[in-house]
Image (spheres, rainbow, N blue to C red):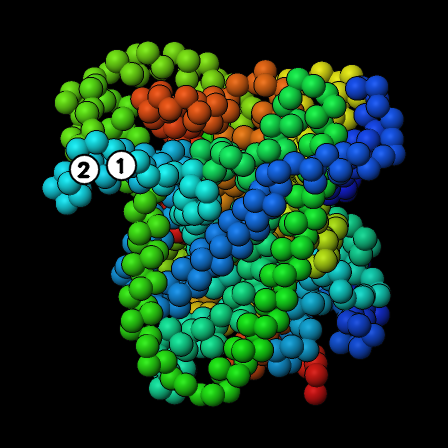
Amino acid sequence: MDKGLSLRNVTISKGGTPLLSVTHDIKPGEVLTVMGPSGVGKSTLLAFITGTLAADFRATGEVWLDGHNITQAAPHQRRVGILFQDDLLFPHLSVGANLAFGLQPGGSAAERKAKIDEALEEVGLSGFADRDPATLSGGQKARVALMRMLLSEPCGLLLDEPFSRLDAALRAQVRDMVFDRARARELPVLMVTHDADDAHATGGVIITLGG
Amino acid sequence: MNRRRFLPVLPILTLLVMLGPVLAGLWGTLLPAFGHLPAAGLTGPSLDPFRDLFDWGGLPRAVMLSITTGLLATAISLAIVMLVTAGWSGTRPFRALERLLSPLLSVPHAAAAFGLAFLIAPSGWMSRLMSPGLTGWDRPPDLLIVQDTWGLTMTAGLIVKEVPFLLLITLAALGQADAQRSVTISQALGYGRLTGWLKTVFPRVYAQIRPPIYVVLAYSMSVVDVAVILGPNTPPSLSVQIVKWMSDPDLAMRLEGAAGALLQLGLVIGALAFWRLGEVVVASLGRRWIASGSRGKFDPVVAQLALFAGASSALTVLLGLVVLVIWSFAGFWGFPDPFPDTFTLRNWMRFGPGTLDALGETALIALTVAFVALILTIGCLEAEYRFGLSFSQRAVWLLYLPLLIPQTAFLPGLQTLMLNVGADVGRLPVILAHLVFVLPYVFLSLADPFRAWDTRMGTIAAALRASPNGVLWRVRLPMLLRPVLTALAVGLAVSVGQYLPTLLIGGGRVATLTTEAVALASGGDRRAIAVYGLMQTGAALVPFALALLLPALVWRNRRGLRHG
């Protein structure tokens, strides 16, 4: 069994025009960065991996995660976590309920609550469970989104320009937090960005698309 | 798993529910129009029905009425809405109009028509307020204002209801037209606000709102309830006469009615073609106007006039409701007195119980229809999201088809068809008939907000291992609570206001608030009419209020869902 996220001969095209082709193995705890200006199809690659590619794109190749071919799997059965540049916390749920949405089913109500409190504490947000996500600051939202994703116990992590909405001071802090946790959980990480700073901070392989 | 097989067929099912009765009804109109009505022992084909129709002395006038009321009501309400939007969008008076929009929209046509009649009739409120001081009248003057021969009052009754509808769809279209920046640019180039809007924004907005405008035209040409209340009697408009023929105990009269229905369809198609031609002419004149570079000298005057017209239109509906309220509590109210001598609860005690029966029937039908329409709509939109099964741009016109084909053209046919196959009239067929008109409105109301939902929310939820159904029920629908409830309220209001389907398909045995209210029109008992009209308005208005209130209450602690 190969742990990690493998892209095997993945090519994506739109209307007959090829956008990108990638072959790469990302080992647990490693980060692959895909760089390029906007419009070259970086996000399409992530959509292909999450299984949400729009109908007007054509993709070939395979995606393997921890020894399973997930290319044809339903989006909710792939165990691929994703963070976007917006936090995308569910606005109708409290901070705690957002985390509970991510937390895998099982356990008593008290156990689940304890896990959520623990997750909040881990990112310095103790006591935030009943808050309305819309009342949080940008950095706080980013941390909740990260913990929500980690509580769903993904086997791989995708980052879609995850730090570009944060100001410079927060940026490095949140970035370190994300990469530290991904490394601690031995998750393979695929990040797309157009920011060279972010790319070099990973210390991993960088692929540049679109010249 | 069941759902997975069910969902993809929903769009087809929806189209069938919506268009099936229309096509069947047209077929059922076509046969008797050419003399084929087995139920009456007649077999065709023959041209006798048309011969009888053209022998009817009232036909030329009835045809003229249909054409003039339709074209006038559409053109005038469109002009008011466009000029008000051009001159005032973004300003304080415009926002006041916007706030009035929901209540104005939910007032049923019949109630608005009664209100107008009670306002401007010779013995109406206006005349009372001005008499005898300004007019010298101490008894109602002998003038034919309501039900005038030219159908002008009927046209006015249509205009006051179509203005809010056209304003609503214009507001929706404005969001996508990038209007504000275009107006800013033209103002920087020295154009007046109104002229700048007309020259830059209007063409884009018009392209978007064209289908609903055609709906307004078709509706205004063939409306029945407003025509019964405000339109002329001798002869009545073509659609009213068709309904009379169809309700005649002599089945043979249905042949003439069916011929009239086909003529009505032809008139609407002709008028739509004429309107299309008008568009081409206006477009060419407009291009010349734009090329002339005129900056809009008369903008302030035109804008003031437009605002006056728009405000009058809104005020008419609201004052109409006020006068309904007064009449519903009125004791003795002698002519030139501005208010009744006494206010009493007697009218409500007397007519209240009867309205409650009708309210029960109305609510049962409306709730069933609106919920079915909502489920079908959400199913269609969700199928579009999951499987990419969407209506193509051309197929969107199919949504408007039931609203473009005059009710009087296919409902009589549907009734005749049911008669031929021996199907029973009653509540269930009425529900199916209402669905034809409710579905398009519910779909059009929900489609934009449903599609505008950030699908990355769905990607996130799926990445958190929520199944497609889980995403729908736990994320998408809760987030869309407000538009979903609004669509439901729209469906309820449309169903509450339906007159002709209830009357014809119900065979006169299904008594809703609307059919009861319109039936009172000929009797002229203002107190009874007022009570029924207000109950009808309430039945349409309360759901809208709830649709605003409930989300605010449920999501009171969720800032991200306010104004959403």
Res. B252 image quadrant: top right
Q: Are marks 2 and 1 in contact (CB under 8 Å)?
A: yes
Residue at the spot 33% in from the left edge and 75% down from the top edge:
B299
State the residue in front, B338 or B467: B338
Vertical position of residue B448 compared to residue B306: above or below: above
Cα separation between marks 2 and 1:
7 Å
A105 w.r.t. A125: above or below: above
Q: Give the SS element for disc 2.
A: loop
Q: Give how far across and how far down residue B239 sits, in percent.
A: 59, 37
Residue A162: numbered disc: none
State the residue position of label 2. B137
Mark 1 lies on residue: B141
| Neighbour tally class for label 1: few under 14, some 14-19, many 20 plus, Cα within 10 Å | few
Amino acid on which disc 1 is placed: Pro
Where is residue A74 shown, x and y percent of the image? 75, 48
Q: If the image is split into quadrants, where does the C terminus of chain A sit?
A: bottom right
Vertical arrangement, residue A119 with respect to residue A107, above or below: below
Residue A34 against residue B549 in the figure, above or below: below
Left or right of B116 in this view: B410 = right
Of all chains, the one bearing label 1 is B
Q: Nearer the viewer, residue B486 or A145?
A: B486
The quadrant in which the N terminus of chain A is found is: bottom right
Residue A78: x and y in percent read 72, 51
